[in-house]
Structure formats: C-alpha cells, structure tokens
Amino acid sequence: MNPEISPREIAADHHEDGETVSDERWFGRFMELFEPVDFAVPQGALQQKWQAFIQGDVRNPDLRISYDIDGIRMKIEAWEVLKKDIEEQEKNVLLQHAYREKIEQQISFQRAKWFLQKGDMGLARMQMERVFPPPEEAQFAHVVFHLRQELQHVQHKNNIPPALRLSAEQLLSCSPEASDDREGYRPSKQVLGYFFNQNRGFVKHCVEILAGALPAREGRDDMDTYESRDMVHALQRIHAAFDLPPWDIEETSERSTMAVDQRRRKTLIPTGRTFSRHEINKFAIQESGHLLIRKPAEHSGIKLFTIGLAGYEESEEGFFRLLDVIYEHDFEQKAVELDQLGHVDRYLALGLAYGYGNKIEGPAGPPRRDFREVFEVMKRYYAYKDMLTAWISGEEEIQRNPDENETIVNSTHTRQAFQVCTRLFSGTDGSDAGCNPKIGIYYTGPYKVLQAGEEDPIIFSMDLFGKKDFTNPLHNELARMASVLNTISSTTERTRT
C-alpha cells in the first residue's frame, strides 16, 4: 500500500457503492492463531511476589513468565503464511490491509515473548511499542507540570489540613521536575458538553438496570462492599437487559484484576476480591458498552470487527473512560476538570518507567526507572489523591495532626501502586521500564475521542459499529462496507421468513 496515498484516498479508490465484503475465508484461520496481548502473572504467584517485595526481601518482583521458544517460532511462521495468503488472494485492499496490520501486531507480540524468554527486556519493549505507542515525553512533562503546580498550591494554601499538606509535600519531594512546553490538543467545555448530552441517557439507563442487581445493605450505600459473585450477578443482569451476544462471566483464582478474553468470549472476575457498588457500576457500564459495539459486528460479513482492528483500543477505551466521567460526576459536566479526563496515574507511571524527567543523563538518554523506583512515587501519588478526596468529602480523619516524619501512605495506597506497576512490568524482571505501554492509552484515549468529535460529532453516539479506531477513515470505510453487507443479509433473512 502506497504510504504517500492517504487512507481516505485508498478507501475512495477501492470501493464502489453497494460493494459488500466478507472475511469468512480468513477469520477462522486467524482465530486459531490469535492470542490476547497479555503478560498477566497468575494470582497465586503474584501474591508471593507481593509479600517478598513489600517485606524488602527483593528490590523488584520477578514477573517473568516461561515461554516455549519452539512454540513461538512455529506461531510466527504460521502468522507469516496467513499474511502471505491474504496478500496474494484477498481482492479487497481495505480488508487485506486490516488483516495485515492485525497480524503484524500478533507477530510483534510473539517476538516480544521471544526476547523476554531470552532475557532482553529492551528488545521486548521495542516489539511491544509496535503494538501500543510509547509515552510522549512532552505529554508526560505536561502531566507532571500540572501535578506539581497543584501540589505547590496545596503546600502554600491557607486552611489546608496538615495530613493533606504533608502528603502533598511528600509527593512533591519525589516527583520529577518538568516544564510544560507541549502544544497539544485541549478539549473545550462545549465538545465535552456535547458528549455528555449524547451519552448521559445511556449511563443513567445502565445505573437503573443495576440498581436492583445487588443485595441491599444497611448504612451508607457508597461504603458497601460486595463479593465477586455479586459482580457476576450484576454483569449477567446488564447482559440480559441489552440482549448482548452470548458471553460467559466467570470467577477465577488465576487473576488479580478483571479481564475480558476476546478469544474465549469470557469476562474474568478475580475470586476473593471485594468491590464497592461504585466499582461494580463502572465496570458494568463499560462492559455493556464494549459488547454493544461488538454486537452488530457479530452479524456482519467482517468478523474481524468483533476482535478489533489494529489500534482500536485507544479510541474505544477513551470513549468508555468518558462514560466513566459522566457517572463519576453524577451526570453533570460542571465539575469536570479538563486535565483529569484520562487516567493520569497510568501515564505518570509509564513516563516514570521510561525515565522521563530523570535528572541523570546516560549515553542513550535518561536511564529508565525500575519497578521499585516507580512504586515509591506512585504510592505517594495515591496517598495524596486519597487525602485530597477525603478533604473534599469532609471526612474527619483528614483533620488530624500527623507527625512531620510520618509517611502518609497506608496499605491501600501500596496495593494500588503495586497493581499499576505490575500491569506495567508484567513479563519482565522489573528492572527496565516494563513491557506494557498499553496503560498509556487510558490517559490519551479520551482526548483522542474528543478531538475527533470536534470534526465529526457522530462518533459520540453509542450507535457505533464494531471494534475499530473510529478516528481512522480506513477503518470507518471498511465498517461501512460491513454494515452494508449486514443490512443486505438481514433483509434477505426477513424475506425468507
């Protein structure tokens, strides 16, 4: 495909009105080889590593996973054969391009596993950067600059509770310095308001469905805790309400975090974990949204849309993060901070691991930070955010006078820091920047969606087709073809009946 021709021109040159397209001959072979891009460490092993790390027995937890080198080699060869067959036999250039991109991502993932098994964390990370973009240093500087401004404001402001002031000072002392010279996109309140207006009703409807899904508790509703089986029941309720595609919801002792397995059509809930009603509602809203986007693709001619075209994650996760924002702010836009739309903590952790803001310069730039270094900053970040929330909520605990040498960090904050670092460093020995730049998209995604919506507000509708980067014109053109085929197939089926 000629790189000098834009995707829009490619789409226009290779499509005729009424043309339909199908990936029936390729999708089965693709799914036989497909693996979710995941380095998750089994929960049992992770608990042991947590104990050794928190007790100081090791500097960094070893999160490596053993891989079969011969199996990886055979998988790469099989992917190459499938890619060659599609390039030679598939006539639709858009479908051919979509499969090539997705296959190349899978090959990069296999190569990353190869290098991890060989002990080369740097080359493994470079392969993963072909799947998910690395953090931008200017974007990281923007995040840190505004965080430090906030901390300095708290530090010098009158009437700040001592515990909050101390937590701000402790985070400020270990956070890198940065200047904000980024010239990037900043959303307007108007475009965010339009997104709210388009999707407020959907979020409210989800909350209404979930209202009766959980057992009643006495006392404050937001302080209730529920078990994994309650999460399963809530998800089953919302699946039934939206008539979502067949999908299993299972409890598992093998994971510490919730996950969606596209290949096996399962949502996995960690056994033994407790959830607040707030957490259950947020996850269920996202779950329903992801599957509603997938639903029309289940009946289309291009099944690759059910798994996701290459690069779909950033815009899709950005869209559903914005649904979170609607829910978190009680459906009202007025209190939303435009710099806090994405998951700041994940981008902060990612940029720290890459060595951004490090005052020490090496021959290849600033040295990257290891698991322990990122963890030390992140636990103080979560402590500060917790203190800030407590102050805004008027909780009495925030008014106490801590000792000036006291560390305002508790077990919850250390767990949060360990979890975000585990997501970043999983698959590695914890020594070199991690191997999962995907966590950055949870910060950048919302801004990508809002920026695209400035030009085409139709993407703010939940009436989206398939798992794609809906800011990509090539993906949108292929989706239009698939939806045309879907409409024709549906009409034919109604005629027969």
Image (tube, rainbow, N blue to C red):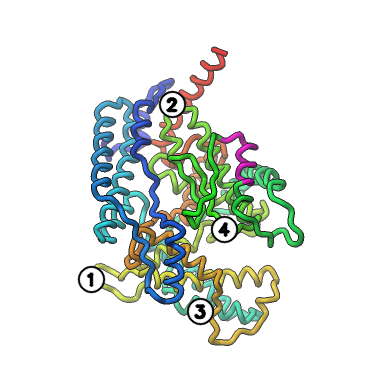
Please, is residue 159 above or below residue 52 in the view? below
* Location of residue 353 in the rendering, given as x and y in whole percent from the top left corner: 37, 66
Residue occupied by mark 1: 363
Residue located at (64% from left, 59% from top)? 335
Q: CA distance from mark 3 to mark 2?
A: 56 Å
Q: Amino acid at mark 3?
A: Gln
Residue occupied by mark 2: 301
> Between disc 3 and disc 2, whose residue precedes?
3
Q: Residue furthest top?
A: 496
| In the foreground, 199 or 218 | 218
* Location of residue 22 in the rendering, given as x and y in whole percent from the top left corner: 39, 25
> Between disc 3 and disc 1, whose residue precedes?
3
Residue segment shown in magenta? 233-244
Please, is residue 434 above or below residue 205 in the view? below
Label 4 or label 1, whichever lies nearer to me, is 4
Q: Is residue 119 left or right of residue 302?
A: left
Please, is residue 345 above or below residue 311 in the view? below
Label 3 or label 1, whichever lies nearer to me, is 3
Q: Amino acid at mark 2?
A: Gly
Q: Amino acid at mark 4?
A: Arg
